[in-house]
Amino acid sequence: MKLPWLTMQGAAILVFGTWLYFRGQIWGNTELFPSEMVGIYTRDSSSFFLALRIVFLAAAGWGVVLFWRSGRLFYIALPFLWFPVLLGLDSLLITLAMGRVARVNTELVPDLPLLYYHGLIEALATVLLGLVVMAILGTYYQNHRRARHFAPGV
């Protein structure tokens, strides 16, 4: 069960990294206005983020099951690491691309609203949530093992 979990983690990172790379190709299209590029990029973002969140929740849930069986926090930590990294890369991609476009077309590019940077906020919240989940589950797991170890008749 551990090998399929690691394979799924690697496949998820590879697929979403590739998807992120191909999403970034929109910025090289010189036939579109900057607002059209942002519109296409953010429209694709909805399906990207939905799929990313679904796979993250599945990986984290499966990681909790593996943690409970083995006691290793690695199984919880890995999904809570690659998910924020991909969110941060997405925000970095749009920031760099719009910076390049803004240098060339200052009159065509308005200020980007903070809504485009929600990936950074969500990434930080995910890291903090992961730390809290690992602390709570780790403490609960240790108490559970200690109680089973010292229970009479076990």
Image (cartoon, rainbow, N blue to C red):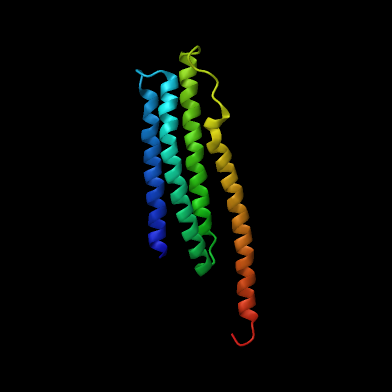
Residue 127, position as x, y percentages in the image: 58, 47
Residue 90, position as x, y percentages in the image: 47, 35
Q: As displayed, is residue 24 above or below residue 153?
A: above
Residue 6, position as x, y percentages in the image: 41, 57
Quarter of the image with the C terminus in it: bottom right
Q: As displayed, is residue 110 above or below residue 117?
A: above
- Decide if residue 119 is on the left or right side of residue 146: left
Residue 61, position as x, y percentages in the image: 49, 58
Examine the image and state in which quarter residue 32 appears: top left
Between residue 21 and residue 41, name the one nearer to us: 41
Task: Please name the residue shown 64% across and 86% down the image.
Answer: 152
Task: Please name the residue shown 45% across and 21% down the image.
Answer: 35
Between residue 61 and residue 93, name the one nearer to us: 61
Examine the image and state in which quarter residue 7 appears: bottom left
Quarter of the image with the N terminus in it: bottom left
Task: Please name the residue shown 55% across and 42% down the image.
Answer: 123
Name the residue furthest bottom.
153
